[in-house]
Image (spheres, grey):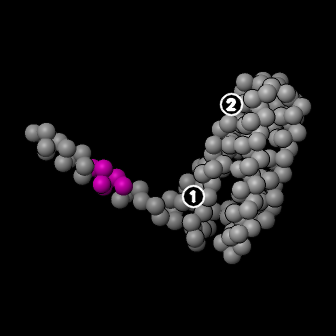
Amino acid sequence: MLKSRLLLAASALTLSVAAFGHGKKDAVDYRQSLMTMIGWDFGHLSDMVKEKKPFDATEFSMRANRVAAMSDQLGEGFPKDSMRQESYAKAEIWTDWDDFQSKAKDFTAQAKLLADIAKVNDAAKNKEQFKKVAATCKACHDKYTRD
């Protein structure tokens, strides 16, 4: 009885993996979801930096940590030729891969620095570093994102 249940569970897992494989569609969905999640936290950080909402050091640090953690995952969402009509990505990502990777690494480095600085609870330093992170986002989006 236990063997048959284990076999059934293993079969279900195998089918699930096959159904949710690592194809081009999945990569686009992955990167768009990741960008949405980064944008969610980044928006809250921006509101604090722009004083649209009160600066909360604990929340700022939490959201900065999230952005830094997610920044490491961006590269997975851009396998070669993973473009569809619904994607905002430009083909130049893959034709100028080294530059794209460099911009992604800049974003990750600046996001991680923001997370480190956010631990200090200095609103002025957080705002200064947030602007650097935003500049790395803009540099990549200006060149590699379709409107």
Residue 102's x, y, as percent? 73, 62
Range of magenta residues: 12-17
Q: Is residue 14 magenta?
A: yes
> In the shown orientation, is residue 117 left or right of residue 4?
right
Residue at the far left: name it.
1
> In the shown orientation, is residue 20 left or right of residue 15?
right
Q: Earlier in the sequence, mark 2 or mark 1?
A: 2
Query: Is residue 120 depicted above or below 46 in this figure?
Result: above
Count of labels shown? 2
Q: CA distance from mark 2 to mark 1?
A: 23 Å
Residue contact at pointers 2 and 1, CB within 8 angstroms: no
What residue is disc 1 on?
Answer: 76
Front-most of residues 2 and 30: 2
Residue type (three-letter) at the residue carrying disc 2:
Met
Q: Residues within 10 Å of mark 1 (few under 14, many from 20)?
A: few
Quadrant showing the N terminus: top left
Q: Secondary structure at mark 2?
A: helix
Q: Which residue is depicted at the point 50% across and 59% down? A: 26
Q: Is residue 118 magenta?
A: no
What residue is disc 2 on?
Answer: 62
Q: Which residue is depicted at the point 74% across and 67% down? A: 99
Q: Which residue is depicted at the point 30% across and 55% down? A: 15
Q: Secondary structure at mark 1?
A: helix
Quadrant showing the C terminus: bottom right
> In the shown orientation, is residue 16 left or right of residue 68?
left
Front-most of residues 94 and 122: 122
Residue 16 visible in the current orientation = yes
Residue 45's x, y, as percent? 77, 35
Query: Is residue 59 depicted above or below 25 in this figure?
Result: above
Q: Which residue is depicted at the point 55% across and 54% down? A: 30
